[in-house]
Image (cartoon, rainbow, N blue to C red):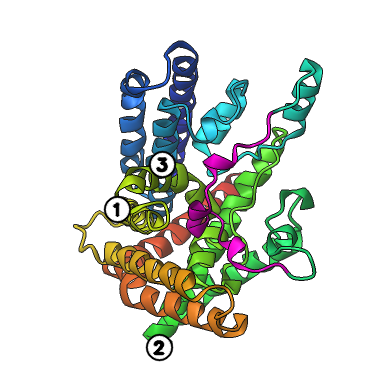
Amino acid sequence: MEGDIIMVIKVNISVVISLCYCYWIGRSISAGTRRLLFLAPIICFFLFIPFNFSSVHLRGNTGFFFAWLGTFKLILFAFNKGPLSSDPSISLGRFVASASLPIKIQQNQPHIRSKTSQDGKTPPPPDPSKHSKSSHFVTNPSSETPKTNGQSKEKTSPTNPSKGHTPLIPYAIKAILLASLVKLYDYSDQIHPKVIFGMYCFHIYFMLELLLATFAALARTMGMELEPQFNNPLLSTSLQDFWGRRWNLMVTSILRPAVYQPSLKATMNVVGPSWAPLPAVFATFVVSGIMHELILYYMGRMPPTLRMMEFFVLHGLCLMVEIVLKKTLGSTRRLPRLVSGLLTFGFVSATSFWLFLPEFVRCHIDVMAFEDYAALGAFLKNLSAAF
């Protein structure tokens, strides 16, 4: 444990120095292939970071933060796209935070609005041609719900950033539930394996929620208002709703410009704008599957079986079928929300038990996680004894 703590400090210092270099490259080298070549050493460094740790939690988290989100952000930045290029006047501190943490800075921040007012200029309205209806198949699943009483679901969504800070009570409840799950694992030999898999599902969800909320709270201390990372995934009414609007929105916001939009543009002239979202959706899920396999390898250090890849390919294919059915049947022939919600929950749960969660057991990640908890407890005990 002590070795990992020292390594965390070294890695953080190296990441900050590396991102300072990337910030300077962004100011010195014009966007394009040449900037990508200058950023390539940092991208390779980010991919190597998880191998420095013995803790499975640190390998998994650094794999997610740096090897996935960080490298994708830097690749987009090389071509002047993505969150690191959203504000040309971004400060060094905000650049480093946005590049190294699993956060997404909101675009309508007060400091940006005040800057435009001082310049005496009003930002131009968005170009409708850049937001075609076809892109809403994935990027805005809430548009599938018709308006009710003159208001769309989008306006009443809990993801609306105008709601301000997230209440602490829900996170406190999730922390208690997570601690309860960890305690229940002591009796795993008396619990049915399928129930254990269900506990793993909630364990992953609660852990991600709390982890991302912690980083969001830290970023707020730097004056950054952040978009939420999850939006009640248990209330999903379709696969489109689950993957596009409710589950791990940070990954969605990165895959959209990095994979979905380029694929959409590449296939537009081949299959037409109406059907181009289908191969773009499939390509997005394939890339997501590849990155999940990479993170699984970081954590378990075992040869891949591609079962997790099969999980995302299956969901990509099913989402394509869902899109076709919605286009064919229209908004008047939809299942009741309760029925579609139960079907979505059942499908995601069943496929997770079948393809996704068994990979964690195969790689003994659950065992290594318990070893991490034991090592952390022993470290804290020795630390308290020393003082």
Q: How many marks?
A: 3
In magenta, the rendered stretch is: 124-147
Q: Residue at x 57, y 71 (%)?
A: 236
In this rendering, does residue 4 appear at all? no
Question: Do callouts 3 and 2 mark residues in contact (Cβ within 8 Å)?
Answer: no
Alpha-carbon span between mark 2 and mark 1 = 31 Å
- Kind of residue at disc 1: Ile
- Which of the numbered marks, if any, corresponds to residue 290? 1
Q: Residue 370, how many percent across, how many down?
A: 42, 64
186 shown above or below 51: below
- Kind of residue at disc 3: Ala
Alpha-carbon span between mark 1 and mark 3 = 14 Å
In front of the other: 57 or 108: 108
Q: Going from the N terminus, do you reach mark 1 or mark 3 first?
A: 3
Q: Residue 328, how many percent across, how many down?
A: 45, 73
**Which residue is tagged 3?**
258
For this view, does 12 lie left or right of residue 173? left
For mark 2, does the 10 Å Cα neighbourhood hold few (<14), some (14 to 19), or many (20 or more) residues? Answer: few
Q: Residue at x 33, y 45 (%)?
A: 269
Q: Is residue 126 magenta?
A: yes
**Which residue is tagged 2?**
192
